[in-house]
Image: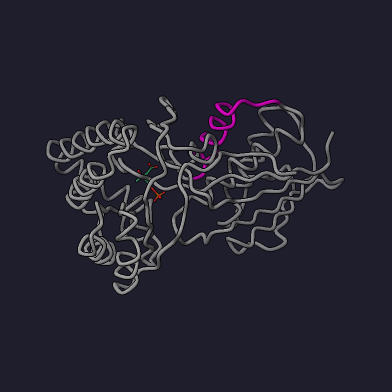
Amino acid sequence: MRKKVKVSAPGKLMLFGEHAVLYGYPCLVTAVDCRMSVSVEETKTNDLELNASDVGIKDYVKSIEKLGKGEVSKGARFVEAAVKNFFQRFEVASGLKVRTESDFSSQFGFGGSSAATVGIIAALANLFKKSLSRRQIFDLSYQTIIEVQGIGSGFDLAAATWGGTLYFTKGGDKVRPISHQKLPLSVGYTGIKADTSALVHQVAHLFRRKPKATGRIFSEIGSIVERATKTLKNGDFQKLGKLMDLNQKLLDKLGVGSKELTGLISAAKAAGALGAKLSGAGGGDCMITLVSEEKRRKMERAIDAAGGKVLRVQTAAEGVKIEE
Ligand code: PMV
């Protein structure tokens, strides 16, 4: 058995279809070239020792039997549950030293917890010589995420697992890679952490209060995703930008926009963006925008002047992989 394994998994950006994906509609997600690295080392103790500087966890120790039980520190929840689920599924156990390190801030909304979860499962599979397919890595990661947070489509796990750009439905019922030309995408960070769970509950509440109107919005978002999938394959970025604007209008109707997101989106549009929308749950985190090369600098300056931070990322990054 190998004693130490290091893997890395990418973060994600939702391109189209957030929220509606939780109601059975598809979404489009892309993996970004910001990675979470996870190293797992076998030890002779009966403990899980965790260091996860990205979420403020230093020298956290928990006995293997108690994983997932009792007080679980917030930043350690996903790792604990992932290790426990892997050990239970494959009937193995060992003391472990786990270290996660990301090359992006956990504040951006790039899906650090999901990338860490996928990373742990993939690393343990390698360490314990279990040859898991990407589908099996996704399924065990999805089980873990649902156990920890109760809700989620799993789109972020899919990006971390398979990489690339994916047409995706809840729970991974459909996962289709979409190949496309390099996306002329820019990202603007609002500086505000989105509360995904609160926003998901807010939309669920709206759906209960106004089922017909809200259901119609979900279905319109679903049809935008279908059109965006074709448009992305064809490389028609003008049209893709228009679809982003339409998707954003519907997200505003769901009430998940925010003053800051609107500010950055309007600034990008005024500076010549082909389209712009929030990415993820809303309320904060990032907005994404498509822009021609000639207008990129002007548009990025406009995002900056509107109080946003421009993040440079490449899309369709590689999925989880063994590094060492
Ligand atoms: O806030 P994020 O980046 O985790 O995105 C949430 C996207 C939702 O569709 C609202 C929820 C989900 O799990 O798909």
Percent coordinates x, y for residue 250 in the rendering: 19, 46
Foreground residue among 42 and 241: 241
Position of residue 117 in the picture relative to residue 240 (left or right) = right
Percent coordinates x, y for residue 216 in the rendering: 15, 36
- Quarter residue 310 falls in: bottom left
Percent coordinates x, y for residue 176 in the rendering: 42, 27
Residue found 19% across the figure and 45% down from its top: 246
Give the quadrant of the C terminus: top right
Position of residue 166 in the picture relative to residue 114 (left or right) = left
In terms of secondary structure, what is the magenta stretch mainly? helix
Examine the structure image and report whether residue 141 is included in the region drawn in magenta: yes
* Residue at the farthest right position: 44
Examine the structure image and report whether residue 261 is included in the region drawn in magenta: no
Total marks shown come to: 0
Foreground residue among 157 and 196: 157
- Quarter residue 211 falls in: top left
Q: What's the image's color scheme?
A: one colour
Report the magenta residues as a range.
131-148
Percent coordinates x, y for residue 106 in the rendering: 51, 59
* Residue at the farthest front position: 294
Foreground residue among 171 and 233: 233
